[in-house]
Amino acid sequence: MPYRLSKWYAFRLKADIKLRGYDSHRPVSYRTSVMNEAALRPLISGRPPAPLNGRIAVPGDKSISHRALMFGALAIGETRITGLLTGEDVLRTAAAMRALGAEVGHDSDGSWRVAGRGIGGLIEPADVLDMGNSGTAARLLCGILASHRLFAVMTGDASLRRRPMRRVIDPLTATGARFTAREGGRLPLAIEGAWDALPLDYRVPVASAQVKSAVLLAGLNAPGITRVEEPQATRDHSENMLRHFGAAVDVEIAGAGRIIELVGQPELQAADVIVPGDPSSAAFPLVAALLVNGSKVTIPAIGLNPLRTGLLVCLREMGADIVVRNRRTEGGEPVGDLDVTAGPLRAADIPPERAPSMIDEYPILAVAAACAAGTTRLRGLRELRVKESDRLAATAALLSVNGAKVEIAGDDMIIHGSGAPPAGGGVVETHMDHRIAMSAMVLGLVTAAPVTADDAGFIDTSFPGFVDLMNGLGASIRAILAR
């Protein structure tokens, strides 16, 4: 019989969570985690003495890195991963897969190896799974655990613990899994996987690659066909990688969306993965190169999946000089090298249907819009309210505190650019959001007065070495002592 969460165990779990520093009654600014979230680590950015110039290799794609580790753990044999992002988010996924029984290690050349256990072969973890700051890892792992016969508890840092998980809990419950969470479906979360998982037929109410992927991952260990319908096409790394590991996946175009069908209980076979450069990370040096007069920067080996390139489309509409060279395919994903040259930008009207292809890039796009000529409208940004922070409000505040004219109308952001950078001089509240922090640092490279980010400690979750890489191009970003 499957294990059921008793009242006694629930009480013990609550006590254990408190002992670990995850007391839900603390204010959300209370920062503790296994990795010791400590004092604020502010950064300040000012105008560089010369244009940005050079070649910058950004970290591997975070979305693909998470999936490579998870799929490798679910496959038979040893998967070798080249170019894996080694930011904190992905390292949490690696630790979670180890806790679930996979052998995960890395070699001196930087490549990683995952010896998988096969579909249905994961073991019950002996301790709480701490996913740090990664919503992607937490939601996708919910899908895997929902159809495995085991019990697990998942938590995260202060930021992740206030992000809603109901969007994956609701559909995954239909597999037969049971979830016990804080109010609003928030972490910490206890998961009892289904004893005999049922396949799902689910229509995603709002475009979300994470929800789609969680449902597909649950379907891997369920008999029959799991079917997901999405109203708008979202990043398809899960579908691409499922095929790469040998699963049968069928995709049908349905208007602006897609219908994905997965044949359950395949025997995934280990397959080597080459992780391309992350387009979401490339966005920051790319926009910096566009804005700092006289700059010319090359960013090689960037993933160009058409469901991830919304930012490039927007910037080109705004007049950006971006040339793609050396197009190729690596590990089932399109890749190319970007040559970026500084130049004036003009305003654009960004449609809501573009959001799934650039959901993480809106803060840095807003920085570009604040320096462009005319009024830019970013439409349909409801999903930004449930990212690492209320990213819609945080982005508006980032611009406003630095003298830009910005307003929020419903789920739209309206930015009134003058064709020149805003004044700057503001202190940006990052709300533990790495993309807000990096966007603030890019803005500070062109404002008259420097821009400060109150805390940049979370940048390493997605872009380890961000400051050194940017300064290597000629940027002026430095740490300052916290007050």
Image (cartoon, rainbow, N blue to C red):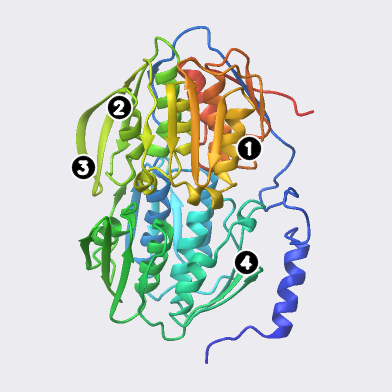
Q: CA distance from mark 4 to mark 1?
A: 23 Å
Q: Which residue was labeled with disc 1?
A: 430
Labels 4 and 1: the sequence-earlier one = 4
**Which residue type does callout 4 highlight?**
Gly
Crowding at mark 1 (Cα within 10 Å: few <14, some 14-19, many 20+):
many
Q: CA distance from mark 4 to mark 2?
A: 42 Å
Label 1 sits on a secondary structure element that is loop
User: In this orientation, which residue lies closer to the viewer: 295 or 358?
Assistant: 358
Q: Which label sits on residue 338?
A: 2
User: In this orientation, which residue lies closer to the viewer: 73 or 4?
Assistant: 4
Q: Residue furthest bottom?
A: 1
Labels 1 and 3: the sequence-earlier one = 3
Q: Which residue was labeled with disc 3?
A: 329
Question: In this rendering, does residue 277 appear at all?
Answer: no
**Which residue type does callout 2 highlight?**
Leu
Q: Which residue was labeled with disc 4?
A: 184
